[in-house]
Amino acid sequence: MKNLLNLTTLTRNELQQLLETATQMRRIVLADYKKGPQLIGQVVGGVWKKPCVSSTAFQLAATYLSGTCVPVFGANELEECLRLSNMGANTVVASCDNDSLFRTVSLRSNASLVNGGSRQYDPVGVLADLLTLYVKLDGLSNLNVLAVGNRDVNKVNELMYCLQLFGSALVWYLPADDLVTARKGIVIDNLSAAFSGADAVIDLGLNTYSDCQSYYGSSGGITRELMDLTRVDCPLLGCTTVVEGAMVKEYEHNAVSTRESCYVAAAMAVLYLLKK
């Protein structure tokens, strides 16, 4: 694997290898001694608009595997990606809305290239979601995963593709009056029906000015009543709380902390497999 621009070009075996490698890497993340030799002598360059989950994860990933990460914030993405490659970086991670940048850089760069989040794709973020489900649900086979919200929709295509490789399905709840968000895959506009029997729920978040009540069942977020329609111990990704009556309470099966450790592990797996 030379580059990781999106997950929709991977085979099931390639995705399985990524997940299994990330599972092993997560042991380093959770251990007291966080030092592996896998990236000794390797330099990871990163280009982000500002510090974010992706930038933090890749800096930690390189450090945990004895490599070096050189982050650059707020620069011209194309220029900096090529400059990092020309200056000898082994891998360049970039986050940019312009998806064509990744094709351009991949053709002109000697370094491996990782999409750290773009308008259409978020491969490492989706890997983190998948690894979280993998850990929480003992695998990815025969699952019914529900996505709610209309913000981080760049993850939807990759989630659908990867889950179907394992015989699972992604269902997306969007209210009928949302005429702006482009429908992808299986979309349901009945809130109760969407939550019924779901094995996991992924909250994509809401765009500014979206009506929280329409997407989550209350003005404060996903309701306990809706989560009670899902499977027992259903993991919730993307948020930590539910609305119960007039109170906002922490949902006991939220997987936010697990996903954060999985994000670093996914970044470690990607860097390691690109080096091989």
Image: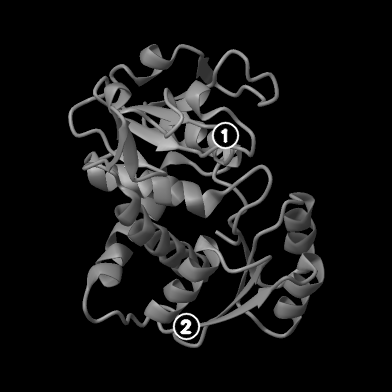
Residue 138, label in figure? none
The residue to which callout 2 is attached is 67
Is residue 31 left or right of 74 when viewed as pictured?
A: left
Q: Viewer-proximal residue, 175 or 71?
A: 175
Q: Residue at x 44, y 69 (%)?
A: 272
Q: Residues within 10 Å of mark 1 (few under 14, many from 20)?
A: some
Is residue 250 left or right of 53 when viewed as pictured?
A: left
Q: Residue at x 55, y 17 (%)?
A: 175
Q: Residue at x 30, y 63 (%)?
A: 26
Q: Secondary structure at mark 2?
A: loop
Provide residue 114's location: percent of width, then percent of height: 60, 61
Q: Residue at x 61, y 53 (%)?
A: 117
Name the residue at the front extreme.
246
Residue 157, label in figure? 1
Q: Secondary structure at mark 1?
A: helix
Q: Earlier in the sequence, mark 2 or mark 1?
A: 2
Q: Viewer-proximal residue, 113 or 110?
A: 113
Q: Is residue 276 visible?
A: no
